Amino acid sequence: MNILLTIIHIFGLVTMGFSGLMSTCLITSEIAHDGATAAFFDGTWITLLLGALMFFPTLLTPKKVSRQAGFLLVATTWSLIPVLCTIPLMIYMPTISFNDAYFETVSGLTTTGATILSGIDNLPMSID
């Protein structure tokens, strides 16, 4: 049980860190006035809140991470962080399916350049 709480604690910290990275897109959108500011604002606060809800209740958990816990933490991070990063895309483009948004997010985080969206040149700079 302590291993699970440790993973939740560290993942909460990573999630809050990603909300900080998401806020750079918020700032970019605000500077560019590209129309996606509200989506990034909502996504940043939702991600920060979820991270805080995982991090702060587990503050007193022992922080020893075993090799197995480390592998589970990495797998969890690479699987679930893109879920949180899809929030602004799904808010800005409500017609996009979750699977398409998840694919686009993973593609963006891994910088593969793959896309399934058409008209990507017409998207706001902060989303593109």
Image (cartoon, rainbow, N blue to C red):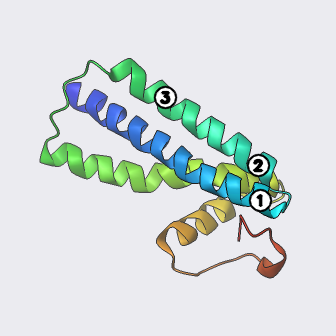
Residue 118 seen in the figure = no
Seen at 80% across and 64% down, the residue is: 32
Of residue 63 and residue 26, the one placed in the foreground of this image is: 26
* Structural distance between the alpha carbons of marks 3 and 1: 27 Å
Residue underneath mark 3: 52
Image height of 61 relative to 30, above or below: above
Residue type beneath disc 2? Ala
**Mark 3 Cα-neighbour bin, 10 Å: few <14, some 14–19, many ≥20:** some
**Amino acid type assigned to the residue bearing label 1 in the image:** Ile
Label 2: element kind: helix
- Residue 3 position in % (x across, y down): 22, 32
Q: Which residue position is annotated with label 2? A: 39
Q: Quadrant of the N terminus?
A: top left
Local SS, label 3: helix
Q: Residues within 10 Å of mark 1 (few under 14, many from 20)?
A: few
Could you give the CA–CA distance between mark 2 and mark 3, rounded to whole angstroms? 20 Å
**Distance between the Cα atoms at labels 1 and 2?**
15 Å
Q: Which residue is mark 1?
A: 31
Can you tell which quarter of the image residue 14 is in? top left
> Which is more N-terminal, label 2 or label 1?
1
Q: Which corner quadrant holds the C terminus? A: bottom right
Mark positioned earlier in the residue sequence (2 or 3): 2
Judged left or right of residue 104, residue 41 is right
Say which element carries label 1.
helix
Please determine whether, in this image, residue 47 is positioned above or below residue 93. above
* Coordinates of residue 26 in the picture (x, y in percent): 69, 52
Question: From this viewpoint, is residue 39 visible?
Answer: yes
